[in-house]
Amino acid sequence: MRGVTLLDDDGTAGGTAAAGADRMKTADTRTADTKTDDMTAGDGEGGEAGVGTWRELLGPGRLGTALVLAGGVALYAVNVYVTTSLLPTAVRDIGGERFYAWNATFFLIASVISSMLVGRTLAARGPVGAYLVAFALFTAGTVVCAVSPVMELLLVGRAVQGLGGGLLAGLGLAVIRFALPPHLWTRGAALVSAMWGIGAFAGPAIGGLFAQMGSWRLAFGALALLAVVIAFLVPRALPRGEGGGTVAAVPVTSLGLLTGAAALVSVAGVLPRGALTAVAVAGALVLVALFLVHERRASVRVLPALTFSAGSPLKWIYLTIVALAIGSTAETFIPLFGQRLGGLAPLAAGFLGAALSLGWSTAQFVSANAVRQATVRRIRVAGPAVLAAGLALTALLQREDAGGLTMVLWVVTYMVAGAGIGMAFPHLATAVMGSTQDQEEAGRATTAINTVQLIASAFGSALAGVLVNLGEPSTVRSAHYLLGGFAVIALVGCLTARAGRSRG
């Protein structure tokens, strides 16, 4: 599940990007009118009063800054799709298919952890130092991925990549206020947000092309080289000095419980089917329960206190976002199913994986035009239902030696599933923002959206591995379990959306 970090007033990042990615961008929670103004006003010489122009942002003197801010987020976003497209080829080369889903889980868990450290890193090292640390981690992890002879080492590389990627995605917005004048903040945020859409299409093209040539390692090498090039610009493009500001404490206990729970679900995916798998999943549920108990009482927490207030709709809205985020992680296995069941070449399979994102993006912009409260509430409930329908229809269409017509239908049903996410998410995020009249608490609630997304995406990736492994050795059965199982979770999202609507 992919996303863009929102910041607390103290400059602390609340989470990154999704897979999860991941695409559920909180920067897209602005109203349709604001979006339109941000993206269109200021082209050429003119523009709205008080808002800088695109030419000013991308012109001499600030182009390097724009390249660093956007480039870091673009690397994160492209990397998500490149890796998804490359994995089927990499698995054939180095083995480790049982750990297929761990690639996303390791990356996302590491991203969650490092996203919580964006504010601290900025305060300690300033924009230049923070970016250099982020690029160093991302490059090191990418190089490890490129040279990995076995899946276990590739997973280590993915974790290090995630640490760097989480910082890069968070810094993309956090540094805007240090690197750009106030009248260019809106343009800078829009540019950074646009990188997620670019990643959804550039990633499959790059990853699929290298995989089709049998050179998956070179794709990681190219990403590492690009990271070095952008890092070279950092000292020349960003202001030096410390970021300053008060830095919130890191919720270590909460993150530890969530990491342990996600790890147990991941382990369940590689254990022999039966009692051990059930024990691992049960252990994960216990850790999640402990997380919720701790969050209720802790002073330093991941979720805002309002989440646990009686009568507040926030918990139900977050649970609906969780259902959507988990559904989005199905795209991790789409290229694999496309290659094995449809005989698609890696490049075509990579773009098949982007179908869900295409439906997501299209529906998001259309849905954002809804303003009547009755319509908005219906959309929040309908979104998970559409996601469930798309996933269920795709599951029914999975078969061996799928023909051209079947694969066309796959594209359509994946787009339908993505549309369910895109139509609901902007309104869910807006509901979070309006969940309380307390502006400080509303800010915390909004900041937590990305953290919720990333955590859900990490769990979704791990759960995907469990469902796919349960279906082995039949790829068709694995696809049925994964897509059908996630359709059920999406239906649960309908219930939580209705609960949130009745209380919102």
Image: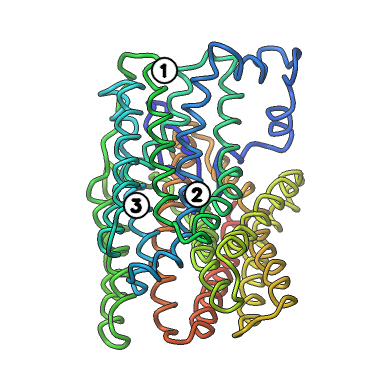
For label 3, the SS is helix
Question: Real-space Cα distance between discs 1 and 3?
Answer: 29 Å
Give the crowd class for mark 2: few <14, some 14-19, many >=20 residues within 10 Å.
many
Task: Residue under label 3, please give it.
Answer: 146
Give the crowd class for mark 3: few <14, some 14-19, many >=20 residues within 10 Å.
many
Question: Real-space Cα distance between discs 2 and 1?
Answer: 25 Å
The spot of residue 50 in percent (x, y) is 66, 12
Indicate the amino acid at tag 2.
Arg
Indicate the amino acid at tag 1.
Leu
Question: Real-space Cα distance between discs 3 and 2?
Answer: 23 Å
Give the crowd class for mark 1: few <14, some 14-19, many >=20 residues within 10 Å.
many
Q: Residue at x 46, y 38 (%)?
A: 5
The spot of residue 339 in percent (x, y) is 55, 72
Q: Nearer the viewer, mark 2 or mark 1?
A: 1
The spot of residue 190 in percent (x, y) is 60, 31
**Res 460 visible:** no
For label 1, the SS is loop
Q: Relative to residue 73, is residue 382 drawn left or right?
A: right
Task: Residue under label 2, please give it.
Answer: 2
Q: Which residue is at the front of the view, 340 or 360?
A: 340
Q: Relative to residue 311, is residue 241 drawn left or right?
A: left
- Give the number of the disc on residue 238: 1
Tell how many labels: 3
Indicate the amino acid at tag 3.
Ala
Determine whether 393 is above or below 69 in the image.
below
